[in-house]
Image (tube, grey):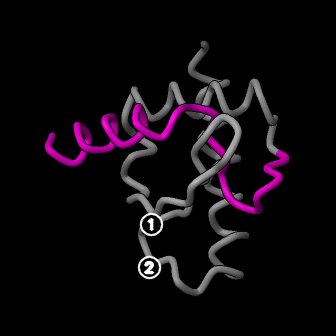
Amino acid sequence: MGAFRLQALVANTKQLIKHNNKHQRDVPKGYLAVYVGEIQRKRFVVPISYLDQPFFQDLLRRSEEEYGFNHPMGGLTIPCCEEAFVCLTTQLHVS
């Protein structure tokens, strides 16, 4: 993926975050709500700093391929299994 496309992906994600944070008062500043799952989705609140992490950017690419930027849950939807997401975010939190 080219640098320009990745920048556009992150910029569009940030716009989605700004839009959703206006409507989701329970998401603290500096965090975003994401919905994770392939069929049934669970909501997670993660730091915005994850947007800079290559593993998280890979999830964003997969999300873009599956949903474009129309996320049916109202927040960022990531199509991966919950266990894999928890494992990834645990690794990001430790590093």
**Residue denoted by label 1:** 31
Q: Quadrant of residue 87?
A: top left
Q: Is residue 80 left or right of residue 15?
A: left
Residue positioned 45% across, 44% down in the render: 51
**Pointers 1 and 2 in contact (CB under 8 A)?**
yes
Q: Mark 1 is on which residue type?
A: Tyr
Q: Mark 2 is on which residue type?
A: Pro
For residue 78: magenta?
yes
Total numbered labels placed on residues in the image: 2
Residue 73, relative to residue 25: is it above or below?
Answer: above
Residue positioned 37% across, 52% down in the render: 49
Residue 21 point in image, percent of width and height: 62, 75
Where residue 28 is drawn, which disc sits there? Answer: 2
| Residue furthest to the bottom | 25
Residue 56 point in image, percent of width and height: 44, 35
Residue 69 point in image, percent of width and height: 80, 43
Task: Classify mark 1: helix, strand or loop.
Answer: strand
